[in-house]
Image (cartoon, rainbow, N blue to C red):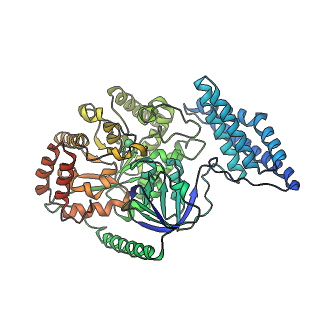
Amino acid sequence: MTFTLHGLAVSGGIAIGHAYLVSHATLEVAHYSLPPRKVDDEVVRLGRAFDAVRAELAELRSGLLNDGTEARGELLAFVDLHSMILDDPLLLDEAGAYIRSRRCNAEWAIKRQMDRLVEQFEQIDDAYLRSRSADVVQVVERVIKALAGKRNRVSTRRRDTDSIVVAHDLSPADTIQFKAQRIAAFVTDLGGATSHTAIVARSLAIPALVGMHQARRLIQDDDMLIVDGVRGVLIINPDERILDEYRLRAREIEIERSKLKRLTGAVATTLDGEAVQLFANIELPQDVEQVREVEADGIGLFRTEFMFLNRDDLPDEDEQFEAYRSVVQAMKGKPVTLRTLDIGADKALRGAERSEANPALGLRAIRYCLAEPRMFVTQLRAILRAAHYGKVRIMLPMVAFQHEIESALAMVALAKQQLREANRKFDDRVEIGAMVEIPAAALALGTLMNHFSFLSIGTNDLIQYTLAIDRADEAVAHLYDPLHPAVLRLVQQVIAQAKRAGMPVAVCGEMAGEPQFARLLLGMGLRQFSMHPSQLLEVKREVLRCDCGDIAPRVIKLLRSDDPIRIREQLERINAGSGIVQ
Ligand code: PEP
Ligand code: MG
């Protein structure tokens, strides 16, 4: 039976393919009965999985012992706690007994035991102890993965190019793993338009829908799906007529894309001769290939924290240095802006997940780095060394306080001093900039301008914090509005103030990659955009068609309005004739 679901389109295009349901290891565990003669083997299989996890944890532990980072103590404590849970007879013995009494598979037995333990934890009054149930889940997750012969990966049974991933929720760490595979599209029940999961999906340059609510429950593995990433529609089991229609539309989009490719070498200048720079956002070093394909002017945002996800250890200085250097060398002298670690909130390090009530307002980004100075200085040293091989800029996320800036700059000085003492080659004159992504930073911009050489507006977080909308929460996703007058005014004020002071300013949030906002931002005076490489040519087309002299006064008028309907109408008029679908 054909039916449709609606959600948020976060990455355009159309995909036609087969559903491929994915989940965290413990969410869906198969249940099957065993013949009596297989029961002993199953208990042995479970024991072997425990052994494998024990070995994994021991390896992790010895890695940590050789590591000099500040986080080491805390991480070691986690590893020890997980080893203790693993060795608790309540887990293996009880699950083994259950396999024998019920003649069921090991996954089912261990999952059931986990559920029982979690239930018991939930009864505990002490909030700290109660929260330790998460550790039990993590340990069992490891065991289930070991049973599947995997080490800490989201289950990925099929890797066909027409697979459409359907998940209830995926963390950014889960999502980034799909970069190594070829999948056709993405659909998740949870998530907002600028959640990091959506951002990664966009950087995969495949259609993606989030906030689908019930998709994971209603769709079955291998169902035929059409993902309409333009309109935010998912069609399940379409008939031939609908399929034909969408095949045609997919071809049209393909033709449109190949036309866009002709703009690759074109210089991004507006009709009235304003030069615009178009930079790229990347998550992993390998993304640099796409950046070169579209001939971006440089990298405006390298989200370095993604290199730290999906692993039990932290990359050491040399590993980071090699990764950064590979990007810097591949860019052949074009600027590479390395954002220092934006760890925390939805991008927690493995084993260091915290249960904060408001993670987006907690220990994230620069706050996290200042709380983990060794980890931060290690990264800074790696960046400074890579800077010797090209043009590197350091960008600090989420800064808002004068003392934070002073501490961060002191860490940069310390990293340089350590490199000097170790006789390492590095670039002493690396420019340091800041992201403007907290309203306080935007409103007291002088604090940032006094200390930094460039600014980049992170509209994703600026919108989240201005409107008090959790960008990852689909329940409030409808309120996430880049065109809210408060947001527009903040963005415009930052651009204007920076320009007056002669300070380079870019936008590197998702707004910069949306063609329908290109004229608006150009009209505000923006001349540096940073976005996913897959969006760059479309934005370039807008730049080439724009007359800033004509548009600027109309944008100023739009900014005076407090009426959301009028703002949208005016933007439509500004965009009229550019071919943009609003
Ligand atoms: C932003 O907040 O706009 C930004 C570019 O950073 P991130 O999306 O990684 O938080
Ligand atoms: Mg941000």
Residue 135 percent location from the top left of the image: 64, 35
Given residues 466 and 51, the one toward you in this image is 466
Q: How many labels does the image show?
A: 0
* Quarter occupied by the C terminus: bottom left
Rendered view: 567 above or below 19? above
Rendered view: 400 above or below 245? above
Residue 515 quadrant: bottom left
Asked if residue 206 can be seen in this view, the reply is no
Residue 172 percent location from the top left of the image: 49, 48
Q: Residue at x 22, y 46 (%)?
A: 564
Residue 505 percent location from the top left of the image: 25, 45
Given residues 443 and 288, the one toward you in this image is 443
Residue 574 quadrant: bottom left
- Extreme residue in the top direction: 126
Asked if residue 442 can be seen in this view, the reply is yes
Residue 287 percent location from the top left of the image: 45, 57
Rendered view: 425 above or below 533? above
Q: Residue at x 85, y 51 (%)?
A: 39
Q: Which residue is drawn at 36% across and 39% down?
A: 469
- Image-based side of 370 in relation to 495, left or right: right
Dividing the image into four quarters, tell me where ligand 2 lies.
top left
Q: Residue at x 32, y 42 (%)?
A: 463
Given residues 80 and 86, the one toward you in this image is 86
- Image-based side of 569 in relation to 340, left or right: left
Given residues 340 and 241, the one toward you in this image is 241
